[in-house]
Amino acid sequence: MWGSPNHGGSIWRCSQPKVGLQGNRSIEDERYLYAIAEEAKRANLKADARLAGGVGGGSNGEDRPPTEFLRMLCGRNNESDLIMDGSNPCSLKIMDMRPKSAAMANRTQGYGYENTNYYRGASINFYGIGNIHAVRDSYQKVCALCLSPNTSDIQWMQLVENTNWPSMTRLILSASWQTAFHVHYNRLPVLLHCSHGWDRTSQVAALSQLLLDPHYRTREGFSTLVEKDFLSFGHPFHTRCGHGEGKNEQGGDEGQLSPIFIQFLDCVFQLVNQFPDYFEFNARYLLLLSEHIYSCRFGTLLCDSEREREVVAGIRQRTYCMWEYLDSIPDLINPVFDRATSEKAGVLLMPLPMLLRNVTLWVDRFCMYGAKASIPCMPHGLQYPPQYFLRNHSILHTVGCGAESVLRRALEVAEMWRGTALNALKEVEELRKK
């Protein structure tokens, strides 16, 4: 579903295998994954030959970053698995998004996870991301916390963490980062899956491509990414969002409702908030997109599958396209985005501790209708924000800005207060004269 144009690193996705308690095998599946691994090795050899200046030149390892640099990137997070050397040979990485306990429990239902004894050169890791029920419970907690007028402001950060929503966000970002690391630095084919392969798998696959490919960090590329990894691969928007259904119509336990796509947008927001120079769209773009998940104003995110959208409902012929609407709003463009710089930089792989430690609550989304003020504001009557913000009124306070824009804003604010002080001095002088 995604492959590097420079070497054999690639991303693949599927659902869980039908292993069961009997330990069933699929010879075709084992051969297929082995063929992927072997083709990746050949692509890497060709890439090494190009770097060495000729076919068959081999690789002297000079193109690989030093081990100390890779350790700095990992920050001691799963370092033994990420930094590969001769002691842990691997030609294909299987990444199971579930907790291992959940994967083992699924064997009682005829499913499970891969036995690497039968998959030559493959290794498997589990990443402990919660299922749809855990996501729904956490989302309800964080929403109730942000909307409650009785929430303790002194313990705000502790209460937010207690909802487990930031922790889930970090788990997804960490799995996505490790996927991108294996593809970019270890040049491995990576196979992603969870249970059904359309919730956690879609999240991690899309986020890892955001990190790897600058095209998907543009507006056109991001819409393509969502269409590909969520819509085309069968993420059930109707089932997860309950479009057009009343309360408890899916069952007393709210059935299969879960804000999976909201969680994905929150993860994208964390990237946009921390590294705005790499994205063509801003946080308001994501906020508006999150609102229209449930508005049903557009047909883009309706139904559970491509067949339902195209054959049964004829959505594209009967409804408006959400991407065209978003692209028609110039205020959703990030003013500090530099396409040439982003394309030149290519991969966005920051140190993992930096990414995870700067995860914050998406205040503009969760506190939008909160009972208490959560976004910085000024008293009524002061001419603030300055002219820069008046021209770009869609920029939100939680969005990080580039160094130049931050300096420009600081100078404009300083100039505003300087003018206020001069006017006050003039008034004092006039009063003294009287």
Image: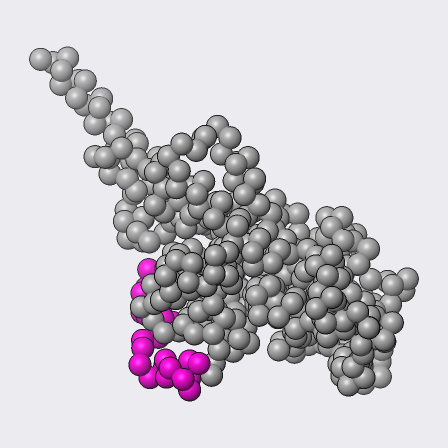
* Residue 7 visible, this orientation: yes
Image quadrant in which the N terminus is located: bottom right
Q: Is residue 264 above or below residue 75?
A: below
Picture coordinates of residue 3, whole percent (x, y): 65, 77
**191 lies left or right of 295:** right
Q: Residue at x 42, y 58 (%)?
A: 248
| Numbered range of the magenta stretch | 308-334
Image quadrant in which the C terminus is located: top left
**329 lies left or right of 78:** left
Picture coordinates of residue 74, whole percent (x, y): 72, 52
Q: Residue at x 31, y 81 (%)?
A: 318
Q: Residue at x 74, y 56 (%)?
A: 101
Magenta span contains residue 314: yes
Observer-nearest of 31 and 89 = 31
- Residue 162 occupies which quadrant of the picture? top right
Observer-nearest of 5 and 235 = 235
Picture coordinates of residue 196, whole percent (x, y): 62, 70
